[in-house]
Image: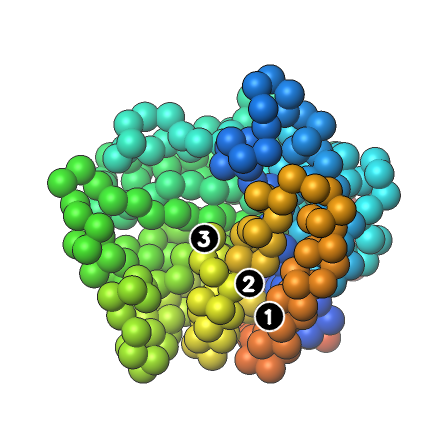
Amino acid sequence: MDAYLTPGKLRGLQQIADESGCFCMCAMDHRGSLEKTLCSGDDCYQPMVDFKIDLCTALASYASAVLLDPLYGAAQAVGQGVLPRNTGLLVSVEATGYDGGKTARLTTVLEGWGVEKIKRMGASAVKMLVYFRPDSVATARAQLDTVEKTALECLKFDIPFLVEPVSYALDGETAADYGRRKTDIVVATAEMMTALPIDVLKAEFPADMSLKSDENDLLEACRALDSASAKPWVILSAGADFPVFYRQVELACRAGASGFLGGRAIWQETTTMINREERRRFLETTAIKRLLELKDVVRRLGHPWYQKYGLEPNCLGDVRDGWYKSY
């Protein structure tokens, strides 16, 4: 598709991509799941901040961008000087968890936070996680409305918007039934989400690899996702073990993905390391090695984000005389 990107959107996408126009991004915005592991009683703030600072210190300079949360990571990383000037910053906008029932999950924006503040703090992009089942009609409509409202805010403040839809099993749906439907769910979700004015889709891998392992079948599922997505897309790790995520990134990039936004697959072992020095050693060795291996996959197989927009690297925006008057 041909598209016109406003200067703020364009600049933000340039900041979170590497020199080839691909995304090699590291997620560090985890909250609820990490709090259960790292916190004891009400003593949560400093252990969480220390963990995010350790992640950022070790990994940020190897990533094209990092994703941090406003509670424990984003401003803290900036304030402690551990976010390199050449690394993009994505900041999550949603509250952790969800409202509604377990099988009718609704996303809300974190109270006291929003797109304007993310833009004001100098971040490169906004990210929103939304639980989503395209076949749960009423809930899906409400979630799409939430995404669209946030997308319009991002248009207003001229900042890129990444959306991370995460699927889940519905009432009466077994894990096997859900797994068998995973491709259809992820593909339909991509089509619906990228019809909205978002900029990048952070997609689940479009198959349950415990039920589908044939490489041709997996590649076909990834190609279906690529066809359904009207916007550039990256693959998320969703807590997969590193070897599994490595294979997923490889398949996704072969099919058209522009890279990855991975978190726990890169650093999840550190969540159980009580000794901070042990944690830092793991991050500075194993985690960096993993990130570099993923970057090599993207370098070889990834598709630049601007291709989905029908743009060329030396012609990303047509700027005309007097553009600033109507901006």
| Image depth: mark 3 or mark 2 in front | 3
Q: What residue type is labelled 1?
A: Leu
Label number found at residue 167:
none
Give whichever of discs 2 and 1 has the lower sequence position.
2
Q: Nearer the viewer, residue 42 or 63?
A: 42
One can see residue 315 in this view = no
Q: Do the residues labelled 3 and 2 touch (CB within 8 Å)?
A: no
Q: Nearer the viewer, residue 291 or 284?
A: 284
Q: Which mark is residue 294?
A: 1
Q: Mark 2 points at which residue?
A: 260
Residue 215, quarter of the rendered image? bottom left
Q: Please identify the residue farthest to the left as the structure is shown.
A: 172
Three-letter code for the amino acid on which mark 2 is drawn? Phe
Sequence-first tag of 3 and 1: 3
> In the image, residue 204 lies at what x, y percent?
41, 57
Q: Evaluate if marks 2 and 1 touch, with contact meaning CB atoms under 8 Å apart.
A: yes
Q: Which amino acid does label 3 sit on?
A: Ala
Describe the element under mark 3 as helix, strand or loop.
loop
Q: Is residue 96 above or below residue 13?
A: above
The residue lying at 33 percent from left, 47 percent from top is 167
Residue drawn where x is 21% and y is 41% of the image: 170
Q: Crowdedness of circle 2 by 10 Å Cα count: few (<14), some, many (20+)?
A: many
Residue 41, percent across and down?
Answer: 57, 19
Tell me where residue 209 sits by quadrant.
Answer: bottom left
Crowd rating for badge 1 (residues with CA inside 10 Å; few <14, some 14–19, many 20+): many
The residue nearer to you, when weighing 231 against 98, is 98
Upstream in sequence: badge 3 or badge 2: 3
